[in-house]
Image (cartoon, helix red, strand yellow):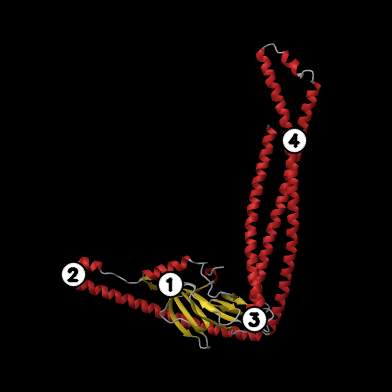
């Protein structure tokens, strides 16, 4: 019975280990599927820009994004290989433990068989029973013999079950080794893909390096345009704050006049107030406070401003590999397969301004309470100042890429009050 308990504990422990391993594999499988989907999407977009006459920073950034995803995909495969290796090790340990238990069970059973053979005269069923001095003693002897036979049968059953468990573990071990072989083969294939991507990146970098002066002009032009956009945004926000404060002051004067003209405390107390509350630097009414809260709670869930596009220039400081060039982007630049792509509002809001950027393109700025979104490099706008817009509503169309790309381009900026922030974490992945 003691060995049976040990065997049960061993099986139970192995069950927990393998169950945890299966859960980890399920999570990795889901992660792998998501990476494969994203890689497929990135590859589809990259195929549209690959082979164009002119390499761009956006193409390089897209290629780097693809390489990053490929690296994560390989990392996922490495995790799977490690898990399978651990499973193989655990299975090998289980098989060795079971073999030792089987040897012990066989040894115990052999000793009991030898003992029974040597004392076979004492175990003659009828003689053993009829030699009892009393009837109760005879009953006890019958019960003893039955118990002994059950014990012998239990020994046999334990041996058979242990042998079966060993065979099951061997089959599992064989399956794990087959899985590991397949994972290693997949790992090699994906590493070859990554190596090809690195070679392709080197080619693009070399071509970009050969036209470093042209890229420097593009970065300088972007810097000027970005500064102009920042000044425009700052001026619009200042005007909006001033307008809201004037509304607030007018409302306060209206309420003060009502209170002075009406000596009835109840009537005065009942006067409806629409005064704005100052939220940080921006006065907000109750509706705008609720809109700000709703916008904030949707971080990571906001839809993309275009249906088909990719981030060609990320937020913040960026550099061009292989060169000494550096630039800064106050938002994110989204490239589209072609000009004229519909640009959509990422959240409910009000159009604060529609303005020209001086290079033939336009920008639309929306207010979402204390949040502001700006959509620039538009070929045209389909909304006007003061319009209320809904999430996903078209507000204009992306203009052509002015930095050598063959498609369209949208510069998307997100402001929290007066401070710019990285829009990427706010958009749905």
Residue placed under numbered mark 4 in the picture: 159
Q: From the image, state whether disc 1 or disc 4 is nearer to you.
A: 4
Q: Do tag 3 and tag 2 residues touch (Cβ < 8 Å)?
A: no
Residue placed under numbered mark 1 in the picture: 370
Question: In the image shown, does 145 or 177 lie closer to the viewer?
Answer: 145
Whole-percent x, y for residue 297 in the image: 47, 65
Dot 3 surroundings within 10 Å: few (below 14), some, or many (20 or more)?
many
Helix, strand or loop at mark 4: helix
Q: From the image, state whether disc 3 or disc 4 is nearer to you.
A: 4
* Quadrant placement of the C terminus: bottom right
How much space separates mark 1 and mark 3, taking CA atoms?
A: 35 Å
Residue 111 falls in image quadrant: top right
How much space separates mark 1 and mark 4, taking CA atoms?
A: 74 Å
How much space separates mark 3 and mark 4, taking CA atoms?
A: 71 Å
Residue 105 falls in image quadrant: top right
Q: Name the residue rendered at 75%, 54% in the picture.
A: 178
How much space separates mark 1 and mark 2, taking CA atoms?
A: 37 Å
Which of disc 4 and disc 3 is earlier in sequence?
Answer: 3
Helix, strand or loop at mark 3: loop
With 241 as the anchor, is 198 left or right in this view? right
Residue placed under numbered mark 3 in the picture: 56
Dot 2 surroundings within 10 Å: few (below 14), some, or many (20 or more)?
few
Question: In the image shown, does 51 or 237 lie closer to the viewer?
Answer: 51
Question: In the image shown, does 69 or 32 lie closer to the viewer?
Answer: 32
Whole-percent x, y for residue 231 in the image: 47, 82
Residue placed under numbered mark 2 in the picture: 263
């Amino acid at each position: 019975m003691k060995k049976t308990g040990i065997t049960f504990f061993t099986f139970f422990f192995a069950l927990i280990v393998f169950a945890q391993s299966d859960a980890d594999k399920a999570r990795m499988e889901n992660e792998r599927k998501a990476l494969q989907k994203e890689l497929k999407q990135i590859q589809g977009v990259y195929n549209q820009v690959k082979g164009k006459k002119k390499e761009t920073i956006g193409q390089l950034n897209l290629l780097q994004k693809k390489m990053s995803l490929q690296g994560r995909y390989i990392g996922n495969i490495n995790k799977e290989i490690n898990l399978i290796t651990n499973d193989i090790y655990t299975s090998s340990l289980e098989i060795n433990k079971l073999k030792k238990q089987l040897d012990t069970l066989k040894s115990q059973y052999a000793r009991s068989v030898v003992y029974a053979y040597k004392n076979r005269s004492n175990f003659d069923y009828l003689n053993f029973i009829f030699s009892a001095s009393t009837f109760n003693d005879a009953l006890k002897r019958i019960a003893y013999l039955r118990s002994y036979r059950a014990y012998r049968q239990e020994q046999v059953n334990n041996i058979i079950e242990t042998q079966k468990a060993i065979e099951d573990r061997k089959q599992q071990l064989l399956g794990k080794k087959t899985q590991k072989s397949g994972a290693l083969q997949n790992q090699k294939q994906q590493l070859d893909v990554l190596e090809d991507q690195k070679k392709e990146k080197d080619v693009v970098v070399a071509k970009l390096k050969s036209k470093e002066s042209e890229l420097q002009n593009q970065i300088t032009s972007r810097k000027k345009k970005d500064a102009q956009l920042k000044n425009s945004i700052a001026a619009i926000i200042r005007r909006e704050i001033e307008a809201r404060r004037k509304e607030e002051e007018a409302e306060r004067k209206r309420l003060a006049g009502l209170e002075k003209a009406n000596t009835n405390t109840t009537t005065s107390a009942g006067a409806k107030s629409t005064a704005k509350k100052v939220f940080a630097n921006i006065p907000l009414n109750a509706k705008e406070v609720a809109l700000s809260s709703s916008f904030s709670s949707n971080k990571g869930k906001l839809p993309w401003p275009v249906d088909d596009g990719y981030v060609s220039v990320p937020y913040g400081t960026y550099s061009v590999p292989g060169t000494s060039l550096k630039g800064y982007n106050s938002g994110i630049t989204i490239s589209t397969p072609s000009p004229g792509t519909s640009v959509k509002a990422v959240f409910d809001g009000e159009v604060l301004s529609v303005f020209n950027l001086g290079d033939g393109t336009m920008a639309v700025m929306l207010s979402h309470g204390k949040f502001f979104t700006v959509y620039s490099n538009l070929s045209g706008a389909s909304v006007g100042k003061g319009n209320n817009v809904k999430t996903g509503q078209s507000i204009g169309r992306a203009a052509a890429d002015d930095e050598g790309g063959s498609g369209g381009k949208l510069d998307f900026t997100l402001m929290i009050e007066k401070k710019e922030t990285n829009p990427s974490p706010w958009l749905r992945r």
